[in-house]
Image (spheres, helix red, strand yellow):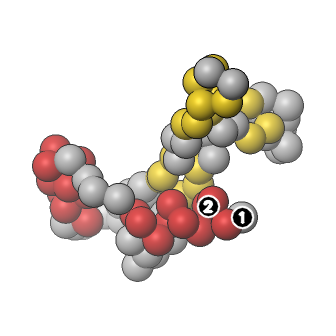
Amino acid sequence: MTLSRAAAVEVDRLQDVRADDRTQDVRVAVDNCIFTVIDGRLEVLLIQMKQEPFDFAWALPGRLVDDGETLDGASGRILEE
């Protein structure tokens, strides 16, 4: 996966966030958007949520990026789950 220049700059900025005299908790999430064409129709991979308050809602497969994990690594982990 190749990040756009703007996305790469934002990731660098988020990784460089430092707490002054207080604790900051910055988390990054990855969502996978996978398209295919079946019988001439554009389709997208969705998952059905299982936890309240979003149970039975549809969403793109995604999760938080683990500490020390790359965006590519997180994306692959999410698809394997």
Q: Quadrant of the N terminus?
A: bottom left
- How many residues crowd mark 1 within 10 Å: few (<14), some (14–19), many (20+)? few
**Disc 1 element:** loop
Residue pushed farthest top? 41
Q: Residue at x 85, y 31 (%)?
A: 56
Q: Which amino acid does label 2 sit on?
A: Ile
Q: Is residue 36 left or right of residue 11?
A: right
- Residue 20 in view: no
Residue tagged 1: 81
Residue tagged 2: 78
Q: Which residue is drawn at 74% across and 41% down?
A: 47
Q: Residue at x 58, y 36 (%)?
A: 36
For the residues labelled 1 and 2, the Cα–Cα distance comes to 5 Å
* Residue 51 versus residue 65 in the image, above or below: above
Location of residue 55 by image quarter: top right
Are dots 1 and 2 in contact, CB under 8 Å? yes
